[in-house]
Amino acid sequence: MRQQSVRRLRRWLVLVKLALIGGAVALAVQHRTDLAGTAATQALRRAGFPDAAVTVTDLSVEQTNAVVRLDRQGTVGGTLTIRHPTDALLEGRIERVDLAGVRLRLDVAKDGVLRVAGYPLTGSAGAGGGNLVIPIDTIQLGDAAVTLATPRGTAGGTLRLTMTRDGATHRGQATLTAPAKGLPVLTHWTGADTIAETVGTLTAKARLTWDGTALKAQGDLLLADLAGRFGPVSASGINGVLSLPSLFPPVVAPGQTLAVKLLDVGLPLTDGTLRFGYGTKGRLSVERAEWHWAGGVLRAEPFAIDPVAPRGTVTLRAERVHLGPMLAMVAVDGLDASGTVSGRLPVRIAADTVHLDGGLLEADAPGTLRYDPENPPGFLKGEEGSPTALLMGALTDFRYDTLTATVDGQAGGELAVGIAIRGSNPAFYDGYPVALNLKVSGALDRILRQSLDTYRIPETVRDRMTEFQRRNP
């Protein structure tokens, strides 16, 4: 009996010993993770983030897991996994850092300085002084929620990033996808308050280089169904890929092409392509702007404009626009025409308005104009021999020798169109020469908008968009 009691006591002592050892190990591990979290927190605070906090959730020889936040509200933070095998540590480097569930808020103050958790991203050292060269072989950031906050509002997007170390330099690739509704917020940061009411999607794929002191970036920007107001000008259906040799500051290489469904500069222009560049001087240089319409072409003479404060005159040249398809869009019963017109349309862009000043279109050659409806409108009905009856008689088969149209007006208002026609109707007073002067308003605006129904993105632009989607960042 006594021997059994002794054996039982020994087993209990062994269990107690094991429990004490296990507790000691647990306390040591807990103490070690707490110590590591405290050390990391202090390091971040010395680097310029006074409200930073790091909680180490797992610590081993090979790997460390932690939850990090850089500000008190938790708008900048995420989960951190650090791979640090012994051989890498002995060589003074970290093998890999993975960041998940990241929230990144970038604040822009009235002075225009960009800050993360109160820390200015100016390239200068933080409170701790000196530049920190991080010996990390690979940095991986997956689907981070990025928010840009300015005095005008906030814009959001999703960022993916991979950086690898090459000596003292990190090189990498990043993809940022964002709805275009945040574009006015972004342009407010750059000083351009002229962009508003934007919709669509923007996707940027960037190539990055970080040498420990400065970040260099270049890449491509995909615009998908972008629309909005750009100062006094509105546009929609903007599609294409832009190559940017520099993102900081933004530079668009010359010769970039976009497809534009509608550009409304007082005269709505449809089914177009735009070739341009944007330099460090902040000027948008348009090399070529062309719109196909009614069997003809509208082209803009080369021009340069400041997108922050657009001012100036852009001259559009119309070449062989067909009257028949153009008037068919009006859908007026009994109206038909043949022939083409060419001319010039000066578009004046002011602070907040767009005007057409002295536009002139002229027939390229003689043609025909016929208006013979089954049921004429009341204002064109009249007794035989009356002026309206004579007018209807002349228009049933009018052969014009010359046709001139003047166009004036303001965007958002009525366009005044004056038409002067000289010619005759063989069946009207034996072909006696007739001169007709007509004035209409608003019709040309409706005609141009009709052609939106048949718009298609040009193949060359669509091919670049498809290649962008296939290509890795």
Image (cartoon, rainbow, N blue to C red):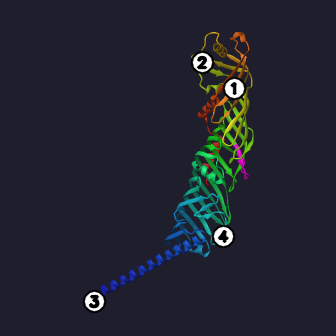
Q: Nearer the viewer, residue 76 or 161?
A: 76
Do the CB atoms of the residues marked 2 and 1 lie less than 8 Å apart? no
Q: Could you tell which of marks 2 and 1 lies nearer the N-terminus?
A: 2
* Label 1 secondary element: strand
What secondary structure is found at the residue carrying circle 2? Answer: helix
User: Which residue has dot 2 on it?
Assistant: 379
- Which is closer to the viewer, label 3 or label 1? 1
Mark 2 or mark 4, whichever is nearer to me: 2
**How far apart are the two marked residues, 3 and 4, measured between alpha carbons?**
71 Å
Q: Report whether 246 appears left or right of 97.
A: right
Q: Which mark is residue 418?
A: 1
User: Which residue corresponds to mark 4?
Assistant: 131
Marker disc for residue 173: none
Query: Considering the numbered disc 3 on the image, is that residue within a helix, a strand or a loop?
Result: helix
- Which residue is the site of mark 3? 3
What are the residue bounds of the magenta stretch? 275-283
**Relative height, residue 53 to residue 112 (above, below):** below
- Disc with the residue nearer the chain's start (3 vs 2): 3
The answer to whether residue 197 shows anywhere in this view is: yes
Q: Residue at (61%, 72%) from the top-left corner? A: 93
Q: Nearer the viewer, residue 16 or 391?
A: 391
The percent position of residue 129, horizontal first and vertical second, equals: 65, 72
Mark 3 or 4, nearer chain start: 3
